[in-house]
Amino acid sequence: MASERTATRTGDAKLEPIGTAVLGQLADLDIRSLSPETARKFLALRFDRSHELRADALSEKASEGKLTADEQAELDEYIQVADLLSILHARASDALLIAGITW
């Protein structure tokens, strides 16, 4: 998989954060190329119950200001994945609408 590189002030190149790279790919996704079956599979992607419970527990702890650094990193990952899923769901939903299919 090719990664995007960005230049820093010193002229060194660094990798674009993976979340940003994937968001860019989702934004560029040609939804007309998605089959209804693929769109429905994308719409079915979700956190499983254990991950929902863990994210809720971490969010609760964060609201109390009691997260450790490792827990904050874990919560950040849950948030990033949830954002990616939301975008993927929106793109899949749009693909079905364009195809004239209700789900």
Image: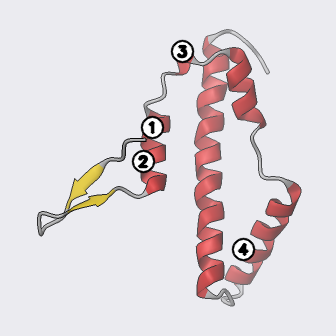
For residue 59, the mark is: 4
- What's under tag 4, amino acid-wise? Ser
- Mark 1 is on which residue type? Gln
- Lateral position of residue 18 relative to residue 79, left or right: left
Give the residue type at disc 3: Arg
* Labels 4 and 2 touching (C-beta < 8 A): no
- Identity, as a three-letter code, of the amino acid under mark 2: Ala
Question: In the rendered structure, which disc, 2 or 3, sits on the residue that comes first in sequence?
Answer: 2
Spatial separation of the CA atoms under disc 4 and disc 3: 36 Å
- Other-residue count near label 4 (Cα within 10 Å), few / some / many at <14 / 14–19 / ≥20: many
Disc number lying in front (4 or 3):
3
Rounded to the nearest angstrom, the CA distance separating label 2 from label 3 is 21 Å
The residue mark sitting in front, 1 or 3, is 1
Question: Which residue is disc 2 drawn over?
Answer: 21
Q: Estimate the x, y position of residue 88 in percent, counting from the top left.
A: 61, 37
Q: Which residue bears the numbered disc 1?
A: 25
Left or right side of 59 for 48: right
Please tell me whether mark 2 sits on a helix, a strand or a loop.
helix
Q: Secondary structure at mark 3?
A: helix
Q: Are marks 2 and 1 in contact (CB under 8 Å)?
A: yes
Mark 2–mark 1 distance (CA, rounded to whole Å):
6 Å
Q: Is residue 88 above or below residue 35?
A: below
Where's the N terminus, which quadrant? top left
Residue at mark 3: 32
Residue drawn at the location 13% of the way across and 67% of the way down: 9
User: In terms of sequence position, does the residue under pointer 4 or pointer 2 come before the other?
Assistant: 2
